[in-house]
Amino acid sequence: MAKKTPQIESIGNVLDQSLKRFDLTSRLDEYGVWPIWREIVGPVIARNAQPEKIRNGTLFVKVSSPVWMQELQFMKDMIADKLNHRLKSELVKNIFFMVGRIEETAEDAVAQAPPSDRAEKFAHQIDEEFLQTIEDPEVRAAFQKLVKSYSRRKAKS
């Protein structure tokens, strides 16, 4: 008697079927926000705001302070639109900001070292250079307003 050999399926097909069965594809799509977050919001905002989780279309973002929470509140529709445009889907319907501890990367640690007078002038030049790298005029204008506000507040203290 001849034995029947089981049909061999590719691992890609098995994973695809499993994702469909457990309805995980939509959840995986939502987590596409993390790899593009820094690119969408820019390095300065990314140092002060990080996505925490996404549930039912609401992206929960930790921010470093109430000041950042307030500033980003004005930009949340714009950020959601840019994320959705990049993800090619309406995944982010709302953004909820909460104050929390931001995980610091090595790049961020260098940027937050205490500046000297010379370094402050250089930082101002970097801010101007950074603003020129932001292609979207709305995001650039909003960020420019944030930088000016921060500079005025810093000068008073």
Image (cartoon, grey):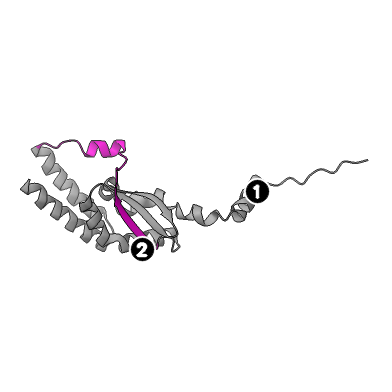
**Which percent across, then down, holds residue 117?**
8, 38
Indicate the quadrant containing the N terminus: top left, top right, bottom left or bottom right.
Answer: top right
Residue at horizontal 21%, vertical 39%?
112
Residues 106 and 154: in front is 154
Q: Residue at x 25, y 63 (%)?
A: 138
Q: In this view of the protein, which residue sits in the foreground, 109 or 63? A: 63
Residue 147 vertical placement versus 114 (above, below): below
The answer to which of 139 and 15 lies nearer the viewer is 15
Give the number of the disc on residue 81: 2
Dot 2, crowdedness within 10 Å: few (<14), some or many (≥20)?
some
Q: Quadrant of residue 21?
A: bottom right
Going 12% across and 42% down the picture, which residue do you hit? 120
Q: Which residue is mark 1?
A: 14
User: Which image quadrant: the C terminus?
Assistant: top left
Which element is circle 1 on? helix
Q: Which residues are magenta?
A: 93-116
* Residue 114 quadrant: top left
Horizontally, is 33 left or right of 134 in the view? Answer: right
Q: Earlier in the sequence, mark 1 or mark 2?
A: 1
For badge 1, the amino acid type reads Val
Residue 95 magenta? yes
Inter-mark Cα distance, 1 to 2: 34 Å
- 8 on left or right of 128: right
Nearer the observer, 135 or 4 = 4
Q: In what element is the residue under mark 2?
A: helix
What residue sits 60% from the left and 55% below the top? Answer: 20
Q: Amino acid at mark 2?
A: Asp
Does residue 4 belong to the magenta stretch?
Answer: no
